[in-house]
Image (cartoon, grey):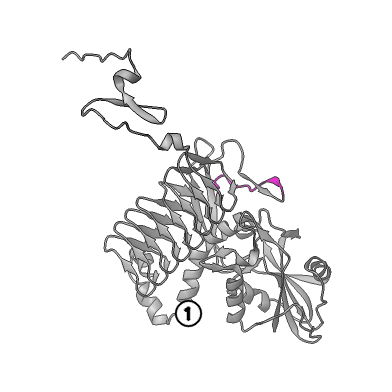
Amino acid sequence: MKALIVPPLVRIEPFGEPAAEAFIGGETLGEAVAEALRQRGIDRQGPDAPADAGGETLVLPDNLFLTREALRLFLSGCAGAGVFRAGLPEGPLPDYVRPLSNFENHGGMWLTDLFLVRGEPVPAAPWEELRRWLAARARAVPVVAETVIERLPQIRPGPPRRELCLPRTLAVVADVRHWVHVLWLNHLLPWIRLRERWQERPAWLRWWRSRGRDPFRREARLSLIGEGCDIHPTAWVEGCILGRGVKVSAFVSLRDCIIGDGVEINEHSRLRRSVLGEKCLVLNDSYFDGCAGYPGATLANVLVRNSLFGRRVFLTSAVMFWDEPVLEPVSVVAGGKETPTGRWQLGCCAGHGSILGTRAVFLPGRAVPNGTIVVMRPDEGTLKFPPRVEPRAPYLPVGDTVAPLKQALPDFRALEVEE
């Protein structure tokens, strides 16, 4: 069997990169799909290769993400010759990844762009033309897998109270064409990748690590720690995948995360359902929930939720990513127009090389272009002190300098407090 991956020229904004280079689960989308194909023994075929009239060809665009379990279920459901198309039955998984995608609903099933052609040649054509040719001949094959729903309460200012249904399943097929898709897939990947890794381990080791009645201790033992990691005894690591050379400092809490090689997480920081690329740096007292950072990012903030950071982003603690709309779900810019996502909690996206400094507030669903620098005005951050300052004398800022209290406020009179 061969795999034909066709580039549909989809670019992820604000990064301006092809969808195949999107950062998902600690690797690019292209690398994740290539690994899923390799696990099934499928070789990739170039778009200019001659078509095989009697063989099997898996056809998909380069912006389609799939796991190896989804690929296995799809191939096992294709019987006979013809054209087959993977479909997701209505449920929590398509509801989670479908907004802003090109999934088509047909008979209660969301049809994806994963096709299998068996027994006839695949025409050489651009993706849109090839997609129409395949869709006209395809038979839908449902990809049905066991799914457990994790209900996460979304804390918002005022009623109604809402919750996010996070699907826990190993079979995922998603169309990636917006930065929100990159973020949402990174919410699912820590759980998926950890289970896939443990399926490759011997049965006796899986049993040994899952023993005991305490669920918290079991989840902590199921973490995968790379070589050369330095984890402080007071740190808590639960259900995570840590790469090589990761440094976890004192009183750090990690839960359901994928941490890349060479990442350093400093004291009293908390990360939950987050993915960090290699060489990222998390400064002290930071809290990130449901976030993803491309390699080389430096992150520091008191609380950031559901946000995406590009390569070499520098984020300070005085920046606020507002993620809670008041009257209606969050909308994002897609295709040059505002498009609703249906989510009541969604942060922002910072492009590659952005420097986000103090006194900056970003509204929900906004995307910061690459190379953006947002800092406070120089006259607010820099004060010139006079050559001589009287000790124990009160001074006040006046413009870009400081002046004695009597000079700045000549009518000021201190009040005497009666005992």
Residue at x-position 51% and y-position 61%: 294
Position of residue 341 relative to residue 98, above or below, is above
Residue 7 in picture, x, y percent from top left: 72, 69
User: Which image quarter is the C terminus in?
Assistant: top left
Quadrant housing the N terminus: bottom right
Magenta span includes 343: yes
Pick the residue in front: 268 or 188.
268
Please give the range of residues in magenta.
336-348
Residue 189: % across, % down: 52, 64
The residue shown at (47%, 58%) is: 297
For the question of whether residue 108 can be seen, the reply is no
Query: The residue tagged with tag 1: helix, strand or loop?
Result: loop
Q: Position of residue 345 (x, y in %)?
A: 54, 46
What secondary structure prevails in the magenta region? loop
Question: Label 1 crowding class (10 Å Cα cut-off): few <14, some 14-19, many 20+?
Answer: few
Query: Label 1: which residue?
Result: 200
Q: Quadrant of residue 326?
A: top right
Q: Nearer the viewer, residue 105 or 190?
A: 190
In the rendered image, the residue lying farthest to the left is 419
| Residue at 18% from the left image edge and 13% from the top image edge | 418
Q: Magenta span has 200?
A: no
The answer, for residue 299, to whether it is visible in the render is yes
Could you tell me which residue is drawn at 32 percent across and 53 percent down?
Answer: 268
Whether residue 98 is situated above or below residue 72 in the rendered picture: above
